[in-house]
Image: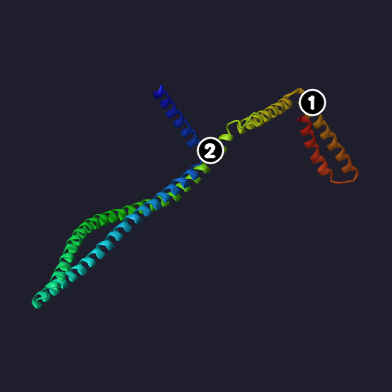
Amino acid sequence: MFKLMKRWWSYTTAKLTGSFNERADPKVQLEQAIQEAQDNHRRLKEQAANVIANQKQTEIRLNRTREEYEKVAGNARQAVMMADDAQKRGDEKKLGEYTSAAEAFANRMVALETEVEDLKSLHLQASQAADQAKSAVNQNSSALQKKLGERQKLLSQLDQAKMQEQLNKAMSSLSEQVGQEVPSFEEVRNKVESRYAKAKGASELNEASVEGRMLEVEQASMNVEAQSRLSEIRAQLGLGTEEAAAAEPQVGEGTAG
């Protein structure tokens, strides 16, 4: 039962993730990825700074311990010299005091020598860690700069993709039905061409019918009568009988037609 619930949860998570990725704006996701990379780089720099600070602190402790060792060694030498001088004078009391002081300084020198060696080892490790931290920061900085450069390229490609998608959608709307109440471009063109073809066909039928020929005859008769009337008017006005005579054959030709 537990395995079944686990598989169901994994399936549901994958399904929801896929649905989210399909609906999510790539531009927003890109900015989120860049922001996450910048945050990771900032955290890496903070960790590297702590590592370097630890190396610096170890170095300071090592230098301070060395300085203290040199001071204690100087005091030990001074105590030995003063003890020797007291012995030469025969001052047993001072000899004992200076000898005890020299032994105390010597014990302190031994402890400081051990501390110096430990600090040397710590400083070496801290220095190596600091070098690794610096290298990691530099590498991650280069990777971040590369991502920032690629962001502009991806944003440009995204804008081009959106424009191409709009163009594809516009081109598809010319051949596909947009909606139930809006005809496609192809449907409108077919409708116009069909209507034009029908009108053209009806016109050709009218020209070939008997009624059409009768209209032609009537029009020809009217033209002959009009030419005859014009000839009479020209004769009454005494205008060029030769022109009237030349016009008569044209009337006859019209009649023959």
Q: Position of residue 159 (x, y in %)?
A: 50, 46
Tell me: 68 left or right of 178.
Answer: left
Label 1 residue SS = helix
How many residues crowd mark 1 within 10 Å: few (<14), some (14–19), many (20+)? few
Tell me: 36 left or right of 248.
Answer: left
Q: CA distance from mark 1 to mark 2?
A: 57 Å
143 over 101 or under it: above or below: above
Q: Position of residue 174 (x, y in %)?
A: 59, 35
Which of the 4 image quarters holds residue 50?
bottom left
Which residue is the site of mark 2? 168
- Residue at horizontal 27 percent and vertical 55 percent from the top: 126
Label 2 residue SS = helix
Numbered badge on residue 214: 1
Q: Nearer the viewer, residue 158 or 37?
A: 37
Tell me which label, 1 or 2, sits earlier in the chain.
2
Q: Position of residue 97 (x, y in %)?
A: 16, 70
109 over 122 or under it: above or below: below
Q: Nearer the viewer, residue 70 or 209?
A: 70
Q: Quadrant of the N terminus?
A: top left
Front label number (1 vs 2): 2
Numbered badge on residue 20: none
How many residues crowd mark 2 within 10 Å: few (<14), some (14–19), many (20+)? few
Type of residue at label 1? Answer: Met
- Residue at horizontal 70 percent and vertical 29 percent from the top: 199
- Residue at horizontal 19 percent and vertical 71 percent from the top: 75
- Residue at horizontal 79 percent and vertical 26 percent from the top: 214
Q: Position of residue 186 (x, y in %)?
A: 60, 31
